[in-house]
Amino acid sequence: MENMNTFQQFFYYFDENGSYVFMQFVQHFLISIYGVLIAAVVGIPTGILISKYGRLSTYVITIANIIQTIPGLAMLAILMLAIGLGQTTVVVAVFLYSLLPIIKNTYTGINNINKDLTDSGKGMGMTKLQVLYMIELPLSLSVIIAGIRIALVVAIGITAIGAFIGAGGLGDIIIRGTNATDGTAIILAGAIPTALMAVLVDLILSFIERKIDPVKKNRKLVEPKIESLEE
Amino acid sequence: MLKLENLSKVYRGGKKAVDDLNIEIKKGEFVAFIGTSGSGKTTALRMINRMIEPTSGKILINDEDVRKKNPVTLRRSIGYVIQQIGLMPHMTIRENITLVPRLLKWDKEKKEKAAEELIKLVNLPESYLDLYPTQLSGGQQQRIGVLRALAANQDLILMDEPFGALDPITRDTLQDLMKDLQQRLGKTVVFVTHDMDEAIKLADRICIMHDGKVVQYDTPDNILSNPANQFVKDFIGSHRLVQEKPSAKVVDDVMITPITISLEKSLDDAIHKMVKSRVDTLFVVDGNNILKGYLSVENITSERHRTSSVADAMDKDVFFVYNNSRLQDSVRRILRRNLKNIPVVDSDHRLVGLITRAHIVDIVYDTIWGDEAAEEVRNEASNE
């Protein structure tokens, strides 16, 4: 080992522990996904609710903002005192951090829809529920996905710290590297896949986001040869 | 059909938007609510489909109190068109048109058929059904907005300044289209506008509102000849009052007989006829004298090598006015579209006459020097 440079050590580590790194990668990803999914299940309806009852929005968003400002390590420590060590605690932390972007984006997404559209929908005889799922949700979906994207990228970072309270994941490898003498290669073996995961998730979700934006989608369909029938 | 009884709306803070409104609208009538902003016209309109709940009073549609109906079912039975058009950007034109049928859970074939029939009503090709609203111009979008209000055979249609955001020419076209659709389909239309020209042109009866009260509710002719008070006079504007003096004519008084040619004739016949009658434009009619298009000398020169039949060479895009319409209206149209002349048709689209630019000159002369002087000039001209 001593006669190898950092790069060679890095590849050597992967060669020897590839399946272990992959296992931690999957675990890391799943912890993040679970937290964000639960946050979406709670956050999207909350966002819809506060966009309908404007007075609630200040309180809800303030609370979510306060949660967001607590440093990650402090949050994990507090949660650990309440629910103990392990993955569940990290999932809960991820859930709490994901609430703000998801609630806020759902709220802005729905609030930014042109009032004329909801007005004409209502005027044509849509029930409140129909206005929600025929107009508001389809039109704000891309903004909501953007919220989930931000949440997921933050979640991957939180999960990395989660290794401190025994949740496993790629953070485990990083901590192992910091504890070892000359552990640069091991730190990289944990850090690079973490960064890669965050970048990939961001790319994939922003692609989906663009795909489902109703306005952008239409622009692509424009056939240049449509002559106006107006005189 | 529609009755508003002692209708009032007081907003929070005590502002009276609509104050004791009493109006009756008959079936098939086109009624315009007109007034300055803040006169309560839009509030009155939106109370009809319960987008705004009245503070007191009653609204009866076919003698049924709308307050006893479910607002959702009520709104599905009333067409609603707004100034901002409000087409759903994530739905195709087809989906937009059939939105109310979809809410009413019609089956697929019935919806498809309705969409295809409807789009023909507003002179747009069927291929437009698969486009998205952003791909259409503002005027085309509002045509779809109007169709959407007709899609489920609603008898009553509410329109809130529907053409306010369009340019003058498009607005003119859409007004004609709306009036035509309303008469053809026998719809009852309640229309909010602040444009007096629009109200005079479209409405069977005009309801002038001020501070939530009805100032005058009458036919356009009666309002113009007997304005109820100074407010109405100011609102109509003095220039329109002058126009409505007894000398105001309908197109039938002045129109001349147009030179026509029938569809099946050849271009050679057309040229002969033009030379013989000393004109540069022929109006193309079918066997029943129904106006089909026009053929100008430009059409002949450009189409001569391609076809020899009048039917192929003619321009089908012809603007016309109906007989018994006011001369003033057709003049406005000639000037705005820069036409050389405009044919006059009866209600079955049979060609009955022609108004030319020379008539505009007569009108301008009339308004400056009056009828007598104009007669003299005309006599002199014919003597020479």
Image (cartoon, grey):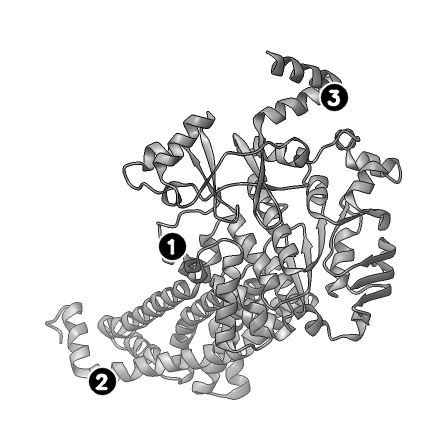
Amino acid residing under circle 1: Val
Q: Chain of mark 2?
A: A
Of badges 2 and 1, nearer the viewer stands 1
Of all chains, the one bearing label 3 is B
Left or right, B237 with reference to A177: right
- Element type at marker 1? loop
The location of residue B260, given as percent across then percent down, is: 49, 37
Picture residue at 57% right of the left edge, 57% below the top: B145
The tag earlier along the polypeptide, 2 or 1, is 2
Query: Taking B322 as reference, is B9 left or right?
Result: right
Label placed on residue B228: none
Query: Which residue reaches farthest left?
Result: A3
Which residue has dot 3 on it?
B371
Residue that carries the numbered disc 2 in the rendered image: A19
Q: What is the C-alpha distance between the residues marked 1 and 3?
A: 56 Å
Graded by Cα atoms within 10 Å as few (under 14), some (14 to 19) or many (20 or more), the crowding at tag 3 reads some
Q: Position of residue B141 (x, y in %)?
A: 53, 53
Q: Quadrant of residue A182?
A: bottom left
Residue B91 seen in render? no
Q: Nearer the viewer, residue B350 or B30?
A: B350
Q: Nearer the viewer, mark 2 or mark 3?
A: 3
Q: At 62% across and 70% down in the image, what residue appears?
A: A63
Residue annotated with mark 1: A222
Establish if A203 lies above or below B204: below
Q: Nearer the viewer, mark 1 or mark 3?
A: 3
Hey, what amino acid is under mark 2? Ser
The residue tagged with tag 3: helix, strand or loop? helix
Residue B54, image x and y in percent?
A: 82, 63
